[in-house]
Image (spheres, grey):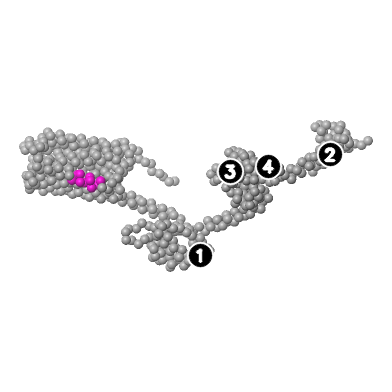
Amino acid sequence: MTQFKKEAAPWFGLHASHQQAMRRVGITVVLLTLAILLVSALPPLPETRGIAGYLPLHTLLETIAIVIAILIFAVGWHAYRRKLPGNLLLIACAFFGVGMLDFTHTISYAGMPDFVTPGSPEKAIGFWLAARSLAAITLLAVAILPWKPLAYTLFRYVLLAGVVAGVGCLHWLMLFHAYLLPQTFVDGQGLTRFKIYYEYALIALNLATVFILWMRMRKPQPYDAAGLFGAVCVMALSEYLFTLYAEVSDIYNLMGHLYKVVSYLFLYRAIFVLAIERPYIQLQAAQNQLQATIKAIPDLLFEIDMEGRYHAYHSPGSDSQPAYAAAYIGKTMREVLPSDVAQIGMSALQEAYKTGFTKGEYQLESPKGKRWFEFSGSRKSVEPGQAPRFVVLSRDITERKQMGLELAESHALLKAVVDAAPARIFWKNNELRYMGCNPAFAADAGALSPDEVVGKDDYQLAWKEQAEIYRADDRQVMDTGIPKLFYDEPTTSSDGKITWLRTSKVPLRNKDNETIGVLGLYQDITEQKLEKIVLQQSEYHLRQAQQIAHIGSWSFDLAGKLLWSDEMYQIYGVAPDTFALNVDNFTLVSG
């Protein structure tokens, strides 16, 4: 018995689609947090003093962060062609600016060559806070904004230009007007209150982003929400570390740079998954689904070029018998098909090349006799400069053809029977207009042929005076769905002649058992009606003569029952309702 995997229950309110990724992210964040607690609990180690001031190590860490930031930009910038969400482009452009600010922060560090102004902790911290602010605000924005594709391609250039202009303004402010900014570091004392509070403000922004992402992950999302969650969490830890150091060269400063690199890696992973890995996974899933669909198709499938050469082939069972494909691949239709069939195929390719689609039929000889095939083809999308190719499906319709022929024969036979029937036969639609009839009905309707009756109603035919009566019967049958069988009704012609008809009507239904019209037939029983009237009159005259002459009569039916006239009962003095007569109990007593 097939087992179905039950969807995982929500984990801390998270949707099942995020749970596995969040477990990995959660473990990493917990370990990084424990590392901070461990370092905070240890007593200060003199040998750690100055370790982060080692310029090559600081430059190395910052260079790694800058490279990752530029990779984030490169991946996100080119992702717009995949019609991915615009938030991806927002992250890309913002981290292009973050990368530039991190680069300036690196070359502004104490001990680095002068960049416009001498390097100093104050200058480096200024560019650091600018970069961190841009990153925190951007991640908060992408957590809030809906993830939808860009409406206009030009917006990407506007966004990038805005980021570059903003970063340029920050450089102008911090390089030429640094005196306007609050102090962030004092030699021998460490960080100022402004620097610490600003870091806490960035941490608050990050925590707000974390909360929003957590709420978003209660439902499926079109992006790697867990990856963004991890990036922001580690970024918050990095900001916290930069509230602890007393020197620009202590262990907290070094750990802050390391945590920043880890947060960038989280972010790059999230962007990479969304822009590159996920589309390829979706593409692979689509290809697998396509292959499964092709294998399930009971038809022949070909990929053919304009020369009629086969480039791909599939038929039911071809996977287990590769010889089928070998008989076609690399060959042309003229090489594997009869000339007349190949000509049909080449003409179909020309039509598909012009219109994009083609369809038709062809016939082939096989060991089982002649087989009919139906084909349909369409032009395949190809890369620019590549020769046109076509996908063609071919289906064996021999049985359908035979059924069609048998159905046509049955229809012809039925039509012959209906046309030859002396009864008048007709059928109407829901609007009570005639859809067809036999010649006998057409003649009564005053038409030369059944075709003249089709589409008309009763008001347009020979019995327009009684049209509403007939239509009322039709409506009753269609509304109730109950047939009305063998009822007699008179009709009067324009010259006053009365004709008696014996009519039956039944509802017409479609395959869904819905009433779509009415089918009726009738016979002219005027002569039978007249004969019955004459017979009734003769019997009446006979009874009158017997009563006058006081003469009785009797007869036997086929069952042997004795039938007496009224005079016989009077002669014998018995009442018809108290005396049953039959051959066995009847005795005639004379004299």
Q: Which amino acid does label 2 sit on?
A: Leu
Q: Give the Cα separation between the discs numbered 3 and 4.
A: 19 Å
Residue at the image point whose x is 61% and y is 44% from the top: 458
Which residue is the site of mark 3?
A: 432
On the image, the x and y values in percent for residue 164 come to: 18, 45
Q: Give the Cα separation between the discs numbered 1 and 4.
A: 60 Å
Among all residues in the image, which is located at the extreme right?
Answer: 591
- State which tag comes first along the sequence, 1 or 4: 1
Instruction: Give the number of the mark in front: 3 or 4.
Output: 4
Q: Give the Cα separation between the discs numbered 2 and 3.
A: 49 Å
246 inside magenta stretch: no
Say what secondary structure mark 1 lies in.
strand
Specify whether 239 is left or right of 457. Answer: left
Instruction: Inspect this view and state whether residue 421 appears.
Output: yes
Q: Give the Cα separation between the discs numbered 2 and 1.
A: 80 Å
Instruction: Give the number of the mark in front: 2 or 3.
Output: 3
156 inside magenta stretch: yes
Label 3 close to label 4 by CB (< 8 Å): no
- State which tag comes first along the sequence, 2 or 4: 4
Q: Residue 542 carries which label?
A: 2
Which residue is the site of mark 1?
A: 365
